[in-house]
Each structure stands twice: as C-alpha cells, then as structure tokens.
Amino acid sequence: MTDTDSDAGSKMPLLEHLVELRRRLMWSVVAFVACFIIAFYFASPVFNFIAQPLVDLWAEEGQTGRFIYTAVQEKFVTDLKIGFFVGAFFAFPMIAIQVWLFVAPGLYKNEKRAFLPFLIATPVLFFVGSAFVYYFVLPPAWSFFADYQQAAEGTNAAIVLEPKVDQYLSFVVRLIFAFGISFELPVILTLLARIGIISTVGMRKNRRYAILIAFVVAAILTPPDPISQLGLAIPIILLYEISILCAQLVEKRRAAEAAKEAEDDPDDDSAGDDEVPA
C-alpha cells in the first residue's frame, strides 16, 4: 500500500464526521445546561457579588441603598439572564475541549502546537478582562454616577440612585463583555501574525490608527462617562503593544524554523554531483 493509499484510508468519511460533530455538540449542550441550572440556582448570590462595588460605595457614604424592580417578572428574567451568562462562562472550557477534540484529529503536529496555546489563552484573557472591569473600573464608575444624586433641600426634590436589577445587570454584563473581548486582542493579532496576514512592521506603522480605533471602540462599547471609556481605551492600547511583542516572537520563531529546515534539506546541486553519469 502506498503512502497515498494509507492517507486516504485514514480519512474519516463524511457520515462519521457528522456523527462526531453531533457527539461534540451534545456534550457542549449538556455542559451548558448543567452550568445554567447551577448558575440559576445561585442567581441571588451571583447578583449580590456583581452588586458589591455599588453596595460598598453606599456603605462608604453612610447610605442604605437598594435595588428595585418595577415589572412583576423582572427579577425572574434577571435570574434567567444570570444563569445564561454565568453558565456560558463556566461551560466555555468544556465547549473549548469539545472543539479541540473535533478539530485536533485533522491537524498536523505543528498545527496542534500552534492552535492549543490560543485555545487556552482565550478564556484566561477574557477572565482577566472581566476581573479588571470589576475591580478597577466599576468602583470609580459608580462613584462618578453617584455624584449626580441630589439631597432634598428647600424646594429641591431628592434624587436618589436606586438601580433596577435588570438594568444594573445589563450594564455590568455589557462592560464585562466589552473588556473581556477587548482583552482577546493579543490572541487575535498574534494568530493573524502567525498565519502571515499582518506583520510587526505594519503594526508599528499603523500604531496611530490603532490608538484612534481604541478610543472609538471604547466610546461605542462603554457608557458615556470618561472613566469607563479611558478604562477600556488605555488597556486596549497597552494590549496592542503587547501584541506587537508577541507577533515579533512569532516572526523570530518562524524565521528560525525556516533556517533550520533550509539546513536540514539536502542541496539539489550537491545531489546532482553525486550522480554517476551513464
């Protein structure tokens, strides 16, 4: 049997591909449903954790704040959203594993080594972005918004911050996704550099445009306050610089591998000299 025949025999038929895809999708759905049920059961503690930055601000100012909901089903729908977002977050590693198990058999060894670090870095960077917005962006943002409260003095009516649970959750989730996705910038740019679509020379040349885009993206994805916008724009710029360093390492490794392959391959001219003429 030739190498071509053995390769053809090792290929998985289309029907088996579909069966394998169904198996991986089933495991992904089971993981998500299980995480959703658990997250929905603990929706109230999760919301309390999400609300802690604002609760801490109220405590520092000696206020007894509260969250409200005006629609009968609003709190229930909020718990469903918490179950969906938190369940998807914790189910992602299992889903990523299923993606890897489906894709890996069709990859060469060097392709596996190239793809696996990006698969691992994706949830890690998203978690770092989420932690960044929770611990460093939300406290000053809430302090900024709370300054617009107004005490009842004379004929002035009192204006008190009493967020609705649904709107508060949507606000925080929007920020978490904005920062989490933005923190994936090194993964995306490094992957593009690895496959040769972009280069470090082009990234340095277009640095001014990247800075402009960072502020535009921050203005679109974050609320209209300077703290949130600067809190997203500055990390994007720093991550862009980190991406340049990562892309530079990728280019150096690619050049080293190309040089090694050139040394290992026999020279065509020397091979021709070894041949004995008839």
Image: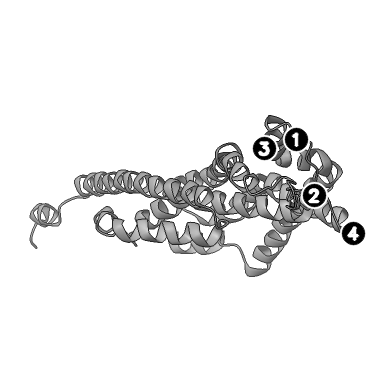
Type of residue at label 3? Pro
For this rendering, which residue is in front, 110 or 33? Answer: 33
Mark yes or no: residue 195 visible: no
Residue depicted at x 68% and y 61%: 21
Q: Which numbered disc, 4 or 1, marks the residue that appears first in the sequence?
A: 1
Residue at numbered disc 4: 73
Which residue lies most toward the right here?
Answer: 72
Q: Amino acid at mark 4?
A: Gln
User: In front: mark 4 or mark 3?
Assistant: 3
Q: Dot 3: what SS?
A: helix
Residue under pointer 3: 53
Q: In which quadrant of the rendered view does residue 203 lie?
A: bottom left
Which residue is situated farthest in the bottom direction here? Answer: 14
Q: Which residue in the structure is indicated by mark 1? A: 63
Secondary structure of residue under mark 1:
loop
Label 3 to label 2, Cα distance in Å? Answer: 24 Å
Dot 4, how many residues are within 10 Å of its Cα: few (below 14), some (14-19), or many (20+)?
few
Which amino acid, by three-letter code, is at mark 2? Answer: Phe
Q: Position of residue 251 (x, y in %)?
A: 28, 49
- Which residue is identified by label 2? 36
Q: CA distance from mark 4 to mark 1?
A: 28 Å
Q: Distance between the Cα atoms at labels 2 and 1?
A: 34 Å
Q: Which callout, 2 or 1, points to the residue nearer the camera? A: 1
The residue sitting at 63% across, 44% down in the picture is: 142
Work out whether mark 4 precedes mark 3 in sequence or the reverse, and give the earlier one: 3
Front-lying residue, 20 or 204: 204
* Secondary structure of residue under mark 2: helix
